Image: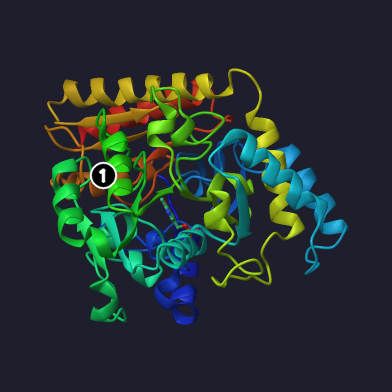
Amino acid sequence: MTLQRPQSGVLYEQALAHIVGGVNSPSRSYKAVGGGAPVFMKRAEGAYFWDVDDNRYIDYLAAYGPIITGHAHPHITKAIVTAAQNGTLYGTPTELEITLARMLKEAIPSLDKVRFVNSGTEAVMTTIRVARAYTERTKIIKFAGCYHGHSDLVLVAAGSGPSTLGIPDSAGIPTSIAQEVITVPFNDLEALKLALDRWGDDTAAVMVEPIVGNFGMVMPHEGFLEGLCKLTREAGALVVYDEVISAFRFHYGAAQTYGIFPDRAAIEPDLTALGKIIGGGLPIGAYGGRKEIMEQVAPLGPAYQAGTMAGNPASISAGIACLELLQEPGIYDRMDKLAARLADGLLSAAKEHSIPLTVNQIRGSFSAHFCDHKVTNYDEAQDTDGERFAKFFRLMLDQGINLAPSKYEAWFMTTAHTTDDIDATIEAVRKAMAHL
Ligand code: PMP
């Protein structure tokens, strides 16, 4: 089976004439996989997409993470319709915001207070401002390959989209700003210690994805988060977790509350940034943390942050509905089993054709790297076969399997995927691997 997509080609030409690069986010372009027209989708339901040529695809992109209950889930759709019927934007507080804030706090106890914003970028950007206001310091330490959105300070050695496109530092960011950021390798406490020895007195925050989702799915080594928190606090800086991808992805809670970390108190952050899943597929972000730090934020404190669209009833209602669905017992175990089945299928197909492949599975998500070594940091994720990935991506797409067009991105299971979907995908994988 090779799908034909003439209409996507026609629309891409039109898009190029009106929208920069034809896409509204660079990660949607196919630049990293050889270029050409990306598939234009027109409908999505459950685990499937249909494109403008009426081809059907099994989807593992999940819109880069948020769509954990599958597309157009009736419970979420109903919540959005009800919200729309009651007015989409008030510019006043609503009871809905209290409900979602309560749900987040119950699932993630480090959040004494939260504030809703519109994107992960905004959430992270504001945690940095708040950390700087609280500590009265300016520098930020981050980890190579971790992506924290597109605000100036964190677009330095960021993974995901920027690394795929080969622009680790964006143009338009003054050197003076980039100099406020120190980047160290993930999973390397020695490097963090050296950075803190040198710049600790000026460091406002150490920012990290506690479980990485942006150069593949990567777990912290045993003791890494504990050591990170200890060293950071000794330096008088704040620990900020970017849980935009990881919150509610692996269990009903965040990476910081995930049962595999034996001493939760030892890894608890001061501030957390959230997004994606907590909006059920509508635009959202949130940040929160310790009361005395969050009280830096206006109207209580001197750190300003605001938003016309923030906490809008549609996004908040979709978020509440999504979290309600995720409370169903066993729901994460089902996604875990599906991911394990698919990961096994990938590994055995690769083995059959003597293709080196490393799969990092974390519950219902995994990354697949064409290499014969482990992937535990950004260097190791970069040192993988991008050309082979590009070929694999296209062979899968032509068989109706939609992956992210980047070797760094994860495959996400949703509650809508079935064993049949997984087995059909494994069949496509076997055929693709035979042509690599
Ligand atoms: N942080 C992380 C960990 C992310 O993965 C992303 C987006 N992929 C962001 C922040 C930025 O979120 P948004 O695209 O909603 O601005």
From the top left corner, tell me how far across and down residue 420 is, in percent: 50, 21
Toward which corner of the image does residue 411 lie, by quadrant?
top left
Does the Cβ of the disc 1 residue fall within 8 Å of ligand 1?
Answer: no
Q: Is residue 149 above or below residue 96?
A: below
Q: Is residue 89 above or below residue 421?
A: below
Q: What's the image's color scheme?
A: rainbow
Task: Give the labeled residue for mark 1.
Answer: 231
202 with respect to 296 (left or right) = left
Q: Amino acid at mark 1?
A: Leu
77 with respect to 283 (left or right) = right
From the top left corner, tell me how far across and down residue 307 is, in percent: 64, 70
Front residue (pair 266, 353): 266
Question: What residue sits 35% from the left and 67% below the top?
Answer: 137
Q: Is residue 119 above or below residue 335?
A: below
SS for tag 1? Answer: helix
Question: What residue sits 43% from the left and 77% below the top?
Answer: 20
Toward which corner of the image does residue 32 lie, by quadrant?
bottom left
